[in-house]
């Protein structure tokens, strides 16, 4: 493999920092760009000082002038509480961020990968969701700033590809969890683990019959890198996620068991508007084109995530938004 100059936007975030770890370990020259809206330098502090890692504080809604061979575009708040905090900024980040990285890719002849999302499918009528499903998104609801921003970004990626020949990759990421999740991001895995460690109740939105399919971070990073390295005639979109589906109640029971908090009461709160009822990736395409499939079961991944949460001091983390 030849060594490359690689830009990771959102590189200090949960997924971005793991991606930087992998790319730095492979010897690439890695530039991490982040405005630290939902992350902190501690996620990449072990990389600072390495000769092949560089950190730039920058907001991707503004243009950036760099010369690189590959771009992973991950900059965007991902947790519902984070992306709804300033919904207009979220939309700007997806759309203007995409325009800026695509412009850079066009100028440098770089390959550019978009971290898209299962939210493209909204509250899906088809189950599991194949890439051909066009989705069921409410364009004016509270999740729209994220869902429609990501849909517009996909449109931009494919238009730059068709109109300007930009070498693109689009990955639809399904719920991913693991070490370095922000403990106060309000996502279900971080909330349940934090609550099972320290708090008097576990917050269940609705009755817990809604489902998600949870992918461990290491599997996701492997999928992203395989997609970047895929032959140029496969640009996606491709689903990357773990097809093992769990109800949120099953997830709660597993976290309670693993944390040894059998006495923890479950507090039922209202289900947020437009909360998808079910979600499971059809990963036939990823298996066929990338020879990729997840390897880490939920129980093992949760054990590793709980160990990480026990190793950090929650006082070191700002909660950028209200959370439960
Ligand atoms: P994260 O919030 O930990 O990471 C996002 C990073 O982007 C953070 O470091 C944040 O500070 C940075 N950022 C946000 N706005 C920015 C801006 N305007 N300019 C520069 N940096 C900015 O979330 P994550 O889970 O690591 O998600 C990474 C990417 O993957 C996102 O694009 C997200 O939409 C996508 N994704 C994640 C999941 C998941 O389950 N983790 C699912 C689907 C899609
Ligand atoms: N959820 C919950 N309790 C929480 C946080 C989330 O019951 O403390 C539910 C939420 O309503 C959704 C699911 O867990 O049905 C996953 O939520 P998350 O915010 O992690 O991600 P989403 O897939 O909805 O973007």
Image (cartoon, rainbow, N blue to C red):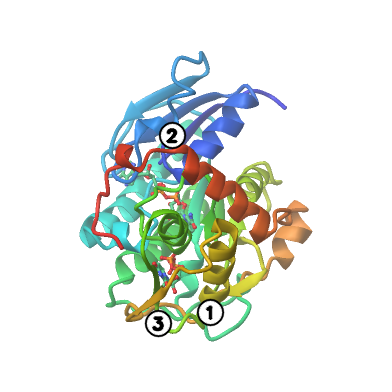
Q: CA distance from mark 1 to mark 3?
A: 13 Å
Image point (47%, 45%), residue name: 309
Q: Which mark is residue 9?
A: none
The reply to whether the residue tagged 3 has its Cβ within 8 angstroms of ligand 2 is yes
Spot occupied by residue 168 in the image (x, y as percentages of width and height): 55, 48
Q: Nearer the viewer, mark 1 or mark 3?
A: 3
Q: Which residue carries the number 3 mark?
A: 206
Disc 1 is placed on an element classified as loop
Disc 2 is placed on an element classified as helix
Spot occupied by residue 22 in the image (x, y as percentages of width and height): 61, 33
Near mark 1 (Cα within 10 A), the count class, few <14, some 14-19 or many ≥20, is many
Q: CA distance from mark 1 to mark 2?
A: 31 Å
Q: Residue at the far front: name it.
A: 263
- Total numbered badges shown on the rendered structure: 3
Quarter occupied by the C terminus: bottom left
Q: Which mark is residue 43?
A: 2
Upstream in sequence: badge 1 or badge 3: 3
Quarter occupied by the N terminus: top right
Q: Nearer the viewer, residue 162 or 145?
A: 145
Image point (42%, 42%), residue name: 13
The reply to whether the residue tagged 2 has its Cβ within 8 angstroms of ligand 1 is yes
Near mark 2 (Cα within 10 A), the count class, few <14, some 14-19 or many ≥20, is many
Q: Which residue carries the number 1 mark?
A: 278
Quarter occupied by residue 151: bottom left
Near mark 3 (Cα within 10 A), the count class, few <14, some 14-19 or many ≥20, is some
Q: Is residue 197 above or below residue 11?
A: below
Q: Nearer the viewer, mark 2 or mark 3?
A: 3
Q: Is residue 307 visible?
A: yes
Disc 3 is placed on an element classified as loop
Task: State left or right for residue 123 relative to residue 280.
Answer: left
Proximity of marks 1 and 2: CB atoms separated by less than 8 Å:
no
């Amino acid at each position: 493999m030849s060594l490359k100059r690689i830009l990771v936007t959102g590189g200090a975030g949960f997924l971005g920092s793991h991606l930087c770890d992998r790319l730095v370990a492979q010897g690439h020259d890695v530039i991490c760009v982040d405005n630290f809206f939902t992350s902190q330098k501690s996620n990449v502090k072990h990389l600072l000082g390495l000769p092949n890692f560089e950190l730039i504080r920058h907001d991707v809604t503004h243009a950036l002038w760099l010369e690189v061979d590959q771009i992973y575009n991950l900059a965007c708040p991902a947790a519902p509480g984070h992306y709804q905090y300033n919904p207009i900024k979220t939309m700007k980040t997806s759309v203007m961020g995409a325009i800026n990285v695509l412009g850079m890719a066009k100028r440098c002849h770089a390959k550019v990968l978009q971290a898209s999302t299962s939210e493209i499918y909204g509250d899906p009528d088809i189950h599991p969701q194949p890439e051909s499903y066009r989705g069921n998104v409410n364009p004016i609801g509270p999740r729209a700033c994220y869902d429609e921003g990501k849909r517009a970004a996909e449109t931009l990626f494919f238009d730059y590809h068709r109109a300007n020949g930009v070498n693109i990759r689009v990955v639809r990421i399904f719920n991913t969890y693991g070490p370095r999740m922000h403990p106060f991001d309000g996502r279900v895995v971080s909330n349940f683990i934090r609550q099972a460690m320290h708090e008097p109740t576990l917050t269940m939105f609705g009755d817990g019959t809604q489902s998600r399919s949870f992918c461990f971070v290491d599997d996701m990073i492997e999928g992203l890198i395989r997609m970047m390295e895929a032959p140029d005639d496969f640009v996606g979109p491709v689903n990357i996620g773990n097809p093992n589906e769990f109800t949120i109640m099953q997830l709660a029971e597993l976290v309670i068991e693993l944390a040894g908090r059998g006495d923890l009461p479950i507090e039922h709160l209202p289900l947020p508007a437009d909360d998808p009822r079910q979600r499971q990736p059809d990963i036939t395409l990823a298996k066929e084109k990338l020879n990729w499939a997840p390897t880490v079961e939920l129980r093992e991944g949760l054990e590793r995530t709980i160990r990480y949460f026990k190793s950090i001091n929650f006082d070191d983390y700002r909660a950028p938004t209200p959370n439960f």
